[in-house]
Image (cartoon, helix red, strand yellow):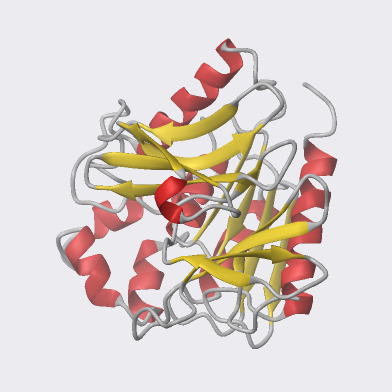
Amino acid sequence: MLHADHPDRIAVSAGGDAAAFIIGPTPGGPTKATGLWYGPLSGQPAKISDLVPDTNLAFAPHGPAFALAVQDGEGSRLVVVDPAAGQADWAEHRLPVFAEQVAWTADALIVLAADPGADTASLTSGKPLAGGAEDPVVARAAGVARCVEDGIADPGRVAAMGASYGGYLTAWAIAGGTPFRCGVVIAGMSDLVSCWGTANNAPFYDYLLQGQPAGLPALYLERSPVTRLGAASVPTLILHGREDRCVPVGQAEELYAGLRRLGVPVEFVSYPREGHDVREPAHVADERARVLRWFGTHLGASS
């Protein structure tokens, strides 16, 4: 039984008998429900911690333990949760990097992390992109190369996927010049000029890019993924809430139109009544099914 307050990042144990999930804070701040939850699939879950991790939850191959990571100003804390024990007894490991994803295989607990300085000159800043390690997409491509080198990734079967700012990074990545074979853009910006003019948070872009489009037209265009689309662009699934005010659905429509005109395989779905996050259970299920189908189609065989 799922809790009523919109559980997120749901993970199911390898045995299929238990689940863990996060309930995040509301726009007004944390509530009593905010935190980490765990329980049997056939029963009532319980909140076991106030922790709200920055990564997914990854169950161990056997048993009830699962891993997560929490970022802070100096890196991350990798936490191994034992639902049968109190939080004081959970194992923690300090990491000097910003953990983004965790996976627990039969051989190891794997952490995908960016270099601590990788986003200091992000795409949505007024700082120039030198194409070096400070470019967040370059940094993630370097992470892909490391995974390939270590033999844990097939270079012909790597995809990019993200939501909100992550959707923006994904839109940038799928435009070309990166190792990703396909992408999934969820609620991502594609044209910073039109987004500035239609979003409910235009001052945020003023701050990030250190000015408005009228004064910095070249910078806004340079950092817009739609201006980079071309022959090297890769197949993309675009998912967006129709009532999104933070990143209006027009951003998805522009990216879709650009890819379609280039003849790049693209699929676009807008969900009615949804905002920046998809919440309705039927839409959540549809979104997940489409993502899995997209990856199955475009990552089904090594190139």
Frontmost residue, 206 versus 31: 31
Asked if residue 231 can be seen in this view, the reply is no
Q: Is residue 259 left or right of residue 245?
A: right
In percent of width and height, residue 186 lies at: 58, 61
Q: Nearer the viewer, residue 22 or 298?
A: 22
Q: Image point 49% across, 50% down: which residue?
A: 55
Horizontal placement of 3 versus 247: left or right? right
Rendered position, 269 above or below 116: below
Q: Quadrant of residue 199?
A: bottom left
Residue 223 lies, in percent from the top left, at 35, 50
140 relative to 102 in the view: left or right: left
Residue at 64 percent of width and 13 percent of height: 151
Q: Position of residue 191 (x, y in %)?
A: 43, 62
Question: Looking at the picture, how far across and down is residue 170, in whole percent?
Answer: 52, 47
Quadrant in the picture for residue 246: bottom left
Q: Nearer the viewer, residue 195 or 115?
A: 115
Q: Is residue 217 above or below residue 15?
A: below
Q: Which quarter of the rendering shows the N terminus?
A: bottom right
State the image quarter where residue 298 is shown. top right
> Quadrant where the C terminus lies?
top right
Residue 225 seen in the current view: yes
What is the tally of numbered marks visible in this picture?
0
Whether 13 is drawn above or below 252: the answer is above
Q: Residue at x 58, y 30 (%)?
A: 109
